[in-house]
Image: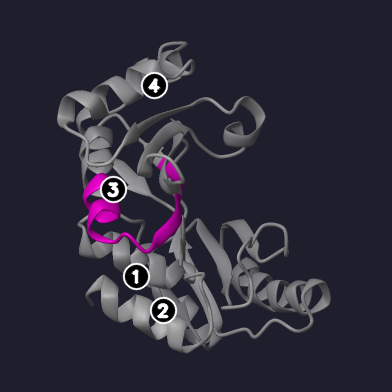
Amino acid sequence: MRPQKIFDKVRKEGRNNLTELESRKILEYYRIPVVRGTVIQEIKDAISFANKFGYPLVLKVVSKDIIHKTDAGAVKIGIENEKELRDGITDLIKTVKKNKPKARIDGIFVQKMLPEAPEVIVGGKKDPTFDQVVLFGLGGVFVEVFEDVSFRVVPIKKREAAEMITEIKGLKVLKGIRGKEPVDFKALIDILMKTSKMLEGNPEIQELDINPVFAFSDDAIAVDARIIID
């Protein structure tokens, strides 16, 4: 689905924040790799997904009323078997109803839990001076802890994307420490280039967070995304 159709739908519903699933569709349109997952309405569908793709899994509540899922208790990780899957879905719904009683629950997003890897953030925002800018840095909790990010004005070239990666203080983590392999820098550059193209082609995007992106030695995969439009 073209981004504009998604944006129009969001506006018609009186929102400016895309759900994770809507954000995923935008990423997929620009061929940014995303983790495998599906939305389920019934536990049996979650079990079918697990039987096909295996454990461990991550569960997330799908709701147009929840922007920050972790703060609402709308995420469960490390689901290892069918019992944990059944219990996890039940507990997740109870927790969200307790923390966000007015939030509408549209389903549960079931996704594969990826192996441990360095986490980075790729994002963007509309700057009052420079207009659209793209950013890169260490992801997960490190974004707020270290604020270790680099910026460039959109559009960027491959050379600039590579410079963004080498400018962050956490570069040593990406190059490999304690015997670990370096991450796939080409894959990260590719995501940065595609993100720049996304921002350039969609000036209504006010904020974009693709966080985390798991940086493996042979690939890079987006796990979560958040988009806010004007």
Residue 115 image offset from top left, x and y in percent: 44, 42
Q: Earlier in the sequence, mark 2 or mark 4?
A: 2
In space, the residues marked 1 and 3 are separated at their CA atoms by 31 Å
Dot 2 falls on a residue whose secondary structure is: helix
* Residue situated furthest left in the rendering: 158
Residue denoted by label 2:
48
Q: Earlier in the sequence, mark 1 or mark 3?
A: 1
In space, the residues marked 2 and 4 are separated at their CA atoms by 36 Å
Residue denoted by label 1:
52
Is 44 situated above or below 162? below
Is 151 situated above or below 48? above
Residue 87 image offset from top left, x and y in percent: 69, 73
Instruction: Classify mark 2: residues with Cα within 10 Å, few (<14), some (14-19) or many (20+).
Output: few
In space, the residues marked 4 and 3 are separated at their CA atoms by 20 Å
- The residue stretch that appears in magenta: 196-213
Residue denoted by label 3:
195
Instruction: Classify mark 4: residues with Cα within 10 Å, few (<14), some (14-19) or many (20+).
Output: many
Q: Are marks 1 and 3 in contact (CB under 8 Å)?
A: no
Q: Earlier in the sequence, mark 4 or mark 3?
A: 4
Dot 1 falls on a residue whose secondary structure is: helix
The reply to whether residue 188 is visible in this rendering is yes
What is the quadrant of residue 111 in the picture?
bottom left
What amino acid is found at the position of numbered circle 3 in the picture? Thr
